[in-house]
Every structure is written in structure tokens, then in C-alpha cells.
Image (spheres, rainbow, N blue to C red):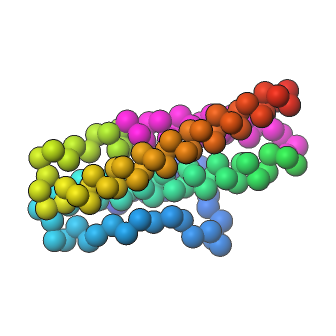
Amino acid sequence: MVERCAPAPGIDLPKHEVPYRPQFVSSARFSTASAEAVDKLACVNEELTGIEQRVRQILAELPTSQSPADLKTELAQLESKAKQLETTGIDDVYTGELNSGKQVAKQSKKDMLARLEVLFATVDETFKKMRAKGT
């Protein structure tokens, strides 16, 4: 069984924010392979949620920031972390051999890949705005 992940390092979430959490089904009713896949994807989801929330915080801070260069650096690091999460967290979970958890795992992967697509577009747009302002 895969252990639950700790939050991504350096990402402190405000207490009032409730992270997006898809309805992951308890892995107790899955085969070992399916349970491991579903657990890994749940862990990746938690990390992705943290990255999404921090990107939103950066976007909110940017207009009034005294150090936009620091925010730009952090945004680049978050983008890199998200790309790593995509390749080593989502794409590494193979669903072809799964039976009992196949549909849950496939849907989870699909949902997270769609969220990553939105995240990367948001980050790219933010970098364009920063360049236009000379940051």
C-alpha cells in the first residue's frame, strides 16, 4: 500500500482555503495493484491542489508585490514541480493492467491532466504579463 504524501515542500496553504478534492473511492475494496494506483493518484491530487492554490495566491499578490522577481522565481519553481508531477506522478500510473480500480484511476488521471493544462496556461499567461511589465 502506498503511504500518503506529505504536502509539497514550501507550499503553505491558508487555513480558510478548502482544497479541491475529487471523490476518491476508498481503496479498501480494490485489488492491491488498483489500491496502490488509486492511493498514488490521491497523493498526487493533494500536491497538485497545493500548487494550484499557491499559484492563485501569487496571482493575487502580484499587483501589489514589492518583490515581483521573487514571485516570478517561485512561479517558475511551481511550474517545474507541476511538470514533474505530471510525468512522475500521473503518467507513471499505468491503468492497463488494473481491473477493480481501473475506471477510478483513469478518471482521476484525466481530471488531473485537465487541471494541469489549465494551470500551465495560467502560468504562461502570468509570465507574459510579467514580461510586459518588465519584471
Residue 92 rendering spot, x and y as whole percentages: 28, 40
Task: Write the residue at 86% across / 31% down.
Answer: 133
Q: Which of these two is toward me, 11 or 72?
A: 72
Residue 45 rendering spot, x and y as whole percentages: 42, 56
Q: Is residue 111 magenta?
A: no
Magenta region's main secondary structure? helix
Q: Quadrant of the N terminus?
A: bottom left
User: Is 83 placed left or right of 32 in the picture?
Assistant: right
Q: Determine the image quadrant of residue 119.
A: top right
Task: Write the residue at 51% across / 56% down.
Answer: 49
Residue 43 rendering spot, x and y as whole percentages: 38, 56
Q: Determine the image quadrant of residue 5.
A: bottom left
Question: Is residue 104 depicted above or below 76 in this figure?
Answer: below
Report the number of numbered marks.
0
User: Is 18 placed left or right of 103 in the picture?
Assistant: right
Task: Write the residue at 11% across / 56% down.
Answer: 99
Residue 82 rendering spot, x and y as whole percentages: 50, 41
Report the span colored magenta: 65-87
Q: Is residue 74 magenta?
A: yes
Question: Is residue 115 depicted above or below 125 in this figure?
Answer: below
Residue 36 seen in the figure: no
Q: Quadrant of the C terminus?
A: top right
Residue 50 seen in the figure: yes
Q: Determine the image quadrant of residue 25.
A: bottom left
User: Is 64 placed left or right of 92 in the picture?
Assistant: right
